[in-house]
């Protein structure tokens, strides 16, 4: 079932230096329970597209809808996770996770219980009382994920959430994300410029062209579901089918870039 949709959406930013067409004629449905990954080069409009769904950015043309109703701003049904975790460093992990629940008016005992449960799910049970400034980047990202999940959103919108992590931590977070997603019913929209990450996580992968961003190809990788069915991660990422798709995507990105130069 489609929850969020962009319908022929375009975004042109107007600044003192003139107009920048960031997105052009983008139609994309985000279905409940899918992991939709948008892959594209830096500057192609990925954050703009996520901003449309989050309600931070208004379309200049076309429309963005949540269950058929125009999106006019942010809402608790759509939780956003950024690369820069945007946590409050002076507060404890559990207070950060409980923060959105407090805004929703939930009582202290209930919200701390939910925060601790979520911190346990992301492997931080024993760090609930620790201040954020005492934590590593990977731990902060897990707190950010727990905070986003605390409000029980229908969609998690993730803007390069793992981009600042070292390679091994990043892979652990990919695994954690799939485990949390499994059976949650929450849809995920994640943007990345890592081809490998996109292939491993996506159940629905859209490839974007360079600016103005358009959707140029769509794939339905099976690797996330294979991993959740028990296949080891190294076997998946080393599978000839995975490697072949990785090369195909790299080639598609390069050919889009050279086409863009021709128009440029
Ligand atoms: N608020 C803004 N005002 C003007 N230009 C912007 C603004 N935000 C983004 N842009 C421009 O729009 C294009 C797409 O940006 P963005 O969506 O951030 O791309 P990505 O996330 O793929 O790197 C870039 O050329 C960027 O400089
Ligand atoms: Mg971006």
Image (cartoon, rainbow, N blue to C red):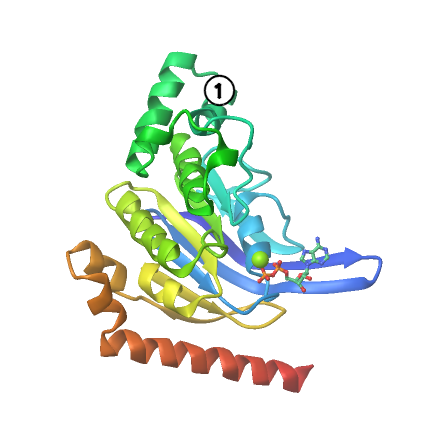
Camera-side residue of 159 and 132:
132
Question: Which residue is farthest right?
Answer: 16
Is residue 87 something that shows in the picture? yes
Camera-side residue of 120 and 10:
120
Left or right: residue 259 compared with residue 93: right
* Residue 153 placement: quadrant: top left
Which residue: 29% across, 43% down? 180
Q: Position of residue 255 (x, y in %)?
A: 51, 84
Which residue: 77% across, 63% down? 19
Left or right: residue 119 compared with residue 87: left
Q: Quadrant of ligand 2?
A: bottom right
- Residue 114 lies, with reference to residue 165, above or below; the image says above
- Residue 252 lies, with reference to residue 56, above or below; the image says below
Which residue: 45% across, 23% down? 101
Q: Position of residue 16 (x, y in %)?
A: 84, 57
* Image quarter of the C terminus: bottom right
The residue pinned by badge 1 equals: 102
- Residue 105 lies, with reference to residue 205, above or below; the image says above
Is residue 118 something that shows in the picture? no
- Residue 263 lies, with reference to residue 215, above or below; the image says below
Camera-side residue of 264 and 95:
95
- Element on which disc 1 rests: helix
């Amino acid at each position: 079932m489609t929850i969020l949709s962009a319908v022929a959406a375009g975004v042109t930013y107007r600044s003192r230096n003139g107009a920048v067409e960031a997105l052009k004629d983008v139609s994309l449905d985000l279905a409940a329970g899918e992991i939709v990954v948008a892959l594209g080069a830096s500057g192609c409009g990925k954050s703009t597209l996520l901003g449309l769904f989050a309600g931070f950015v208004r379309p200049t043309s076309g429309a963005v809808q949540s269950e058929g109703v125009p999106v006019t701003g942010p809402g608790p049904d759509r939780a956003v996770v950024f690369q820069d975790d945007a946590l409050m460093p002076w507060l404890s992990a559990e207070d950060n996770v409980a923060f959105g629940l407090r805004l929703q008016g939930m009582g202290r005992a209930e919200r701390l219980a939910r925060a601790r449960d979520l911190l346990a799910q992301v492997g931080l049970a024993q760090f609930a009382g620790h201040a954020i400034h005492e934590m590593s980047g990977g731990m902060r990202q897990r707190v950010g994920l727990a905070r986003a999940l605390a409000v029980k959103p229908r969609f998690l919108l993730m803007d390069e959430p793992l981009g600042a992590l070292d390679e091994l931590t990043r892979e652990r977070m990919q695994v954690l994300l799939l485990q949390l997603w499994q059976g949650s019913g929450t849809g995920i929209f994640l943007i990345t410029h890592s081809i490998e990450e996109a292939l491993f996580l996506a159940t629905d992968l859209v490839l974007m062209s360079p600016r103005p961003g358009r959707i140029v190809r769509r794939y339905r990788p099976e690797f996330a579901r294979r991993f959740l069915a028990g296949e080891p991660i190294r076997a998946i990422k080393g599978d000839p089918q995975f490697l072949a798709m990785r090369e195909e995507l790299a080639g598609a990105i390069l050919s889009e870039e050279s086409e863009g130069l021709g128009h440029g």
